[in-house]
Amino acid sequence: MIGCSVVTGDLGLIFVLVERWHGETSSFHLPVGELTITLDDVSSLLHLSITGALHSFEPLVMEEAVILLMELLEVSGQEARAETAQARRAYVRLLWVWDIYLSRCEARWWIIAARAYLLHLVGCTLFTNKSATHVHVVHLEAFRDLGESGRYAWGVAVLVHMYDQLNEASQSSRRQITGYITLL
């Protein structure tokens, strides 16, 4: 994912694309015709699987997020509560997740380190949000069994997330877009 990332220096181009996005058809209406981002594009550009199991990323309440953090990252309940309380929802700071990754590597707890790394990775790339500093804990559930996580259709989830973000950003009152901008 990091290798596929593109630094998008031309924000004007991104804003023009967002202005031309039509949520009803999930496409850009350009002078040359209609254009959309397809699953094939996601697969070709990002090398993410578009076939496989679909993971349901159901929203979590804070207490569920705390339990998930305790169970899968092996942090204390107090530490998990403090981290989610800071965001006032089921999110954690990317920096905090990175610190967990580093400490688990030091302790040689490789499975937990891998979960923390993957949560950090999807928070920085595939499922970015407007804060650019937090990741939703719900994504951690996909890394419960690391052997299974590769079987998910990650490309589908990324495309749905990008469509949702384009729909939101195309509203006249919005000034930001998130998601994996490399797709644009």
Image (tube, helix red, strand yellow):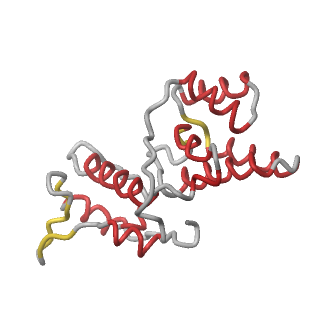
Q: Residue at x 31, y 48 (%)?
A: 164
Is 105 drawn above or below residue 44 in the view shown? above
| Quadrant of the snapshot with the C terminus | bottom left
| Quadrant of the snapshot with the N terminus | bottom right
Near-viewer residue (23 or 145):
145
So how many labels did they put on this image? 0
Tell which residue pokes out farthest to the bottom in this image: 32
What percent of the width, then of the height, locates residue 38? 29, 67
Is 97 drawn above or below residue 88 in the view shown? below
Near-viewer residue (170 or 155):
155
Q: Quadrant of residue 95?
A: top right
Q: Quadrant of residue 41?
A: bottom left
What percent of the width, then of the height, locates residue 150? 56, 58
- 23 with respect to 100 (left or right): left
- 116 with respect to 183 (left or right): right
What percent of the width, then of the height, locates residue 126? 48, 56
Is 140 drawn above or below residue 182 in the view shown? above
Q: Residue at x 30, y 69 (%)?
A: 13
Q: Residue at x 19, y 64 (%)?
A: 28
What percent of the width, then of the height, locates residue 162? 35, 55
Near-viewer residue (17 or 173):
17
Near-viewer residue (151 or 39):
151
